[in-house]
Amino acid sequence: MAWALELNQADASAGLRLALERGAEAAIASLGKTDGFLGDPRVRIPLPGVLNDAAKLLKALGQGKRLDELVTAMNRAAESAVPKAKPLLLKAIKSASAADAMQIVRGGDTSVTGFFREKTSAPLTESLLPIVTEATEKQSVAQRYNALASRAAKVGLLKGDDVNIQRYVTQRTLDGLFLMIGEEEKKLRADPLKTGSALLKQVFGR
C-alpha cells in the first residue's frame, strides 16, 4: 500500500512509541482500579480449570461464600498489581528499534501487543509476582486455595501455574493486560483519526 511505502523509519518509530504508550496507559487505567478485573467479564479471573467447573457443586455444599471471597481476592490482587507494570512497559517502548517499528506498524491488528508480550512477559512476571503474592496472602482463602489445589494436583486435576494461586493470578493478570492493550490497538488502527494525533493518522492511516 502506498501509505506503507511512503512511511519512513523515523515516522514509524515515533508513531509506534506513541501508540505503545497510549495503549499501555489506557489498559492500565482500565484495569488498575476497583472492579477493573472483577467487573469486566473479558478479563475477570475465575477459579482455574476443574475448580471453576466444580464451583456449583461446592456452593451446594456450603462453600459458596468462600469461593466468592477467593475470586474477589484474586481479582483485587490483579487490580493492585497492574499499575506496577507501567515502568517495564515504558522501558520496552524505549527499546524498540526502527526496524521493530516498521515491522509492527505494517503488521496485523495486534502487532503492537505482540511486541509488548514478547519484550515484557518474563520481566513482568518477575515484577508482579511479589505484588500478587502480598495481596493474596492478606486473604486467608489463599492458603485454603493452595491446599485444595495441591490435593487436586495429586490426582491430576490441576497442573502448572494453576496449582499455585499467586502464579495463576500473575499469569491471568498479564493475560488481561495484554488483552486490553490489544483492544486499544485495534481501536487505534480502525480509526487513527479519532486519536487526535496527526502522527498516528499518518502512521496507521490508510
Image: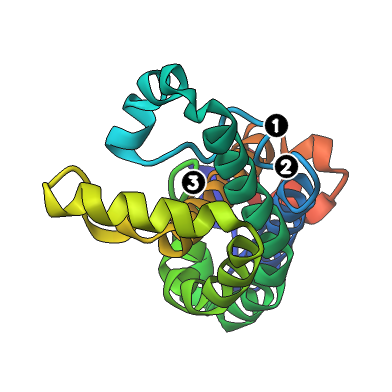
Residue 24 position within the rendered picture, expressed as x and y whole percent measured from the top left: 69, 58
Assign a secondary structure to mark 1.
Answer: loop
Residue 54 position within the rendered picture, expressed as x and y whole percent measured from the top left: 33, 26
First in sequence: mark 2 vs mark 3 = 2
The outermost residue toward the front is 62
Assign a secondary structure to mark 2.
Answer: loop
Query: Circle 3 sits on which residue?
Result: 110
Task: Find out whether the residues at labels 2 and 1 contact each other: C-beta distance under 8 Å.
Answer: yes
Name the kind of residue labelled 3 in the image: Thr
Name the kind of residue labelled 1 in the image: Gly
Alpha carbons under labels 2 and 1: distance apart: 6 Å
Residue 145 position within the rendered picture, expressed as x and y whole percent measured from the top left: 43, 51
Alpha carbons under labels 2 and 3: distance apart: 21 Å
At 31% from the left and 51% from the top, the residue drawn is 149
Query: Circle 2 sits on which residue?
Result: 36
Judging depth in this view, the residue of 72 and 64 nearest the camera is 64
Assign a secondary structure to mark 3.
Answer: loop
Classify the position of the C terminus by image quarter. top right
Name the kind of residue labelled 2 in the image: Gly
- Asked whether residue 105 appears in the rendered view, the answer is no
- Residue 168 is left or right of residue 161, and the answer is right
Q: Residues within 10 Å of mark 1 (few under 14, many from 20)?
A: few
User: In the image, which disc is placed on residue 39?
Assistant: 1
Q: Residues within 10 Å of mark 3 (few under 14, many from 20)?
A: many
110 vs 87: above or below: above
